[in-house]
């Protein structure tokens, strides 16, 4: 199952629709790249407006029952998250090669949104358990990667390691074996939260003919797709390519 494809013409994301014969509920996964052409995010927004429910990625906020609300206070988790995302925020801020950072305003879509991702407190707690050397390496390296991409990063250079399919999803975090605790925090723990939310939605609404959009980073898609197949028999029945960015600069 191809999730992100890099070809001679550019980078594409595969929008995957999952269904099961026993119920009319469908899940549509939007594998996100956090830096892309504005047209990619515009295309995703248009499709999201036609959905009945959105499950969105996003660390932060506080949890009340099964729902999460934004926090107005600065948090160490938010500061750490900003440092980690600087690898793509810096080139996007200056629109390097005409690319921009992901900018979907979910509140403006008019569709209910759930965000099962980690709260500020959960992320900070997990981050504090990561060995100090792993934290230091990542916090130091991410801004340097961002500066390098800003200065020298062409579209082809950015795309070099974006190709992704479900055959190697367990290794999507570079150096996962050496950074086991960090990989668990950024990947596995958040994957479990996402899968738990999709399982909850299935149990609540499996008899309804609704479309649930899952808008998460591409690395989180394969674990969720395989998880829903194992739990409830959902399979990929349809796929549509959206262009993330082309190589004509």
Image: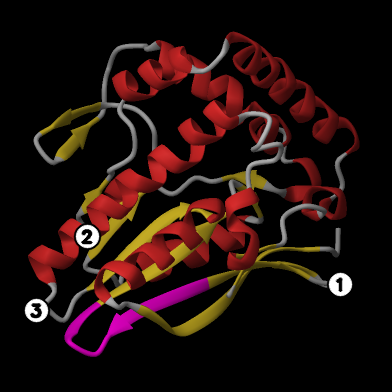
Q: Image point 26% across, 21% down: which residue?
A: 71
Q: Secondary structure at mark 2?
A: helix
Q: Nearer the viewer, mark 2 or mark 3?
A: 2
**Which residue reaches farthest bottom?**
21
Q: Is residue 191 above or below residue 166?
A: above
Task: Kindly identify which numbered label has been placed on residue 221.
Answer: none
Residue 178, given in percent of the width and then of the height, sits at 68, 30
Horizontal side of residue 116 vs 201, given as left or right = right
Q: CA distance from mark 1 to mark 3?
A: 43 Å
Crowd band around label 2 with a 10 angstrom C-alpha radius: few (<14), some (14–19), many (20+) = some
Q: Which residues are magenta?
A: 15-25
Judge whether residue 118 can be spotted in this image.
Answer: yes
Q: Is residue 139 above or below residue 29?
A: above
Q: Image point 35% across, 72% down: which residue?
A: 229
Q: Say if mark 2 contacts mark 3, CB within 8 Å.
A: no
**Which residue reaches farthest right?**
152
Task: Locate the N terminus by quadrant.
Answer: bottom right
User: Which residue is labeled 1 in the image?
Assistant: 8
Q: Is residue 81 above or below residue 234?
A: above
User: Which residue is labeled 3 in the image?
Assistant: 207
Q: Nearer the viewer, mark 1 or mark 3?
A: 3
Residue 218, given in percent of the width and then of the height, sits at 55, 55
Q: Nearer the viewer, mark 1 or mark 2?
A: 2
Number of on-image labels: 3
Q: Within the image, what quadrant is residue 20 found in?
A: bottom left
Q: Secondary structure at mark 3?
A: loop
Horizontal side of residue 43 vs 152, given as left or right = left
User: Which residue is labeled 2 in the image?
Assistant: 199
Task: Locate the C terminus by quadrant.
Answer: bottom right
Q: Within the image, what quadrant is residue 27 found in?
A: bottom left
Which numbered disc flags the more N-terminal residue, 1 or 2? 1
């Amino acid at each position: 199952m191809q999730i992100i494809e890099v070809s001679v013409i550019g980078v594409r994301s595969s929008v995957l629709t999952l269904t099961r014969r026993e119920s009319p509920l469908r899940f549509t996964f939007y594998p996100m790249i956090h830096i892309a052409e504005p047209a990619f995010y515009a295309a995703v927004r248009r499709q999201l407006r036609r959905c009945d429910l959105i499950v969105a990625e996003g660390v932060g906020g506080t949890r009340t029952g099964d729902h999460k609300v934004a926090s107005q206070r600065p948090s160490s988790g938010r500061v750490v998250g900003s440092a980690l995302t600087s690898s793509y925020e810096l080139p996007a801020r200056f629109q390097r090669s005409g690319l921009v950072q992901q900018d979907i305003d979910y509140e403006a879509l008019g569709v209910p949104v759930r965000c099962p991702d980690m709260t500020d407190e959960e992320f900070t707690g997990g981050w504090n358990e990561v060995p100090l050397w792993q934290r230091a390496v990542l916090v130091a390296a991410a801004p340097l990667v961002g500066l390098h991409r800003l200065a020298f990063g062409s579209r082809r250079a950015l795309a070099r390691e974006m190709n992704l399919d479900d055959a190697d999803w367990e290794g999507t975090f570079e150096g996962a074996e050496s950074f086991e605790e960090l990989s668990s925090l950024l990947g596995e723990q958040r994957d479990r939260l996402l899968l738990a939310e999709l399982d909850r939605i299935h149990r609540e609404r499996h008899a309804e003919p609704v479309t649930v959009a899952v808008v998460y980073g591409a690395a989180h898609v394969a674990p969720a797709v395989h998880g829903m197949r194992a739990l409830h028999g959902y399979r990929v029945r349809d796929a549509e390519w959206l262009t993330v960015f082309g190589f004509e600069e």
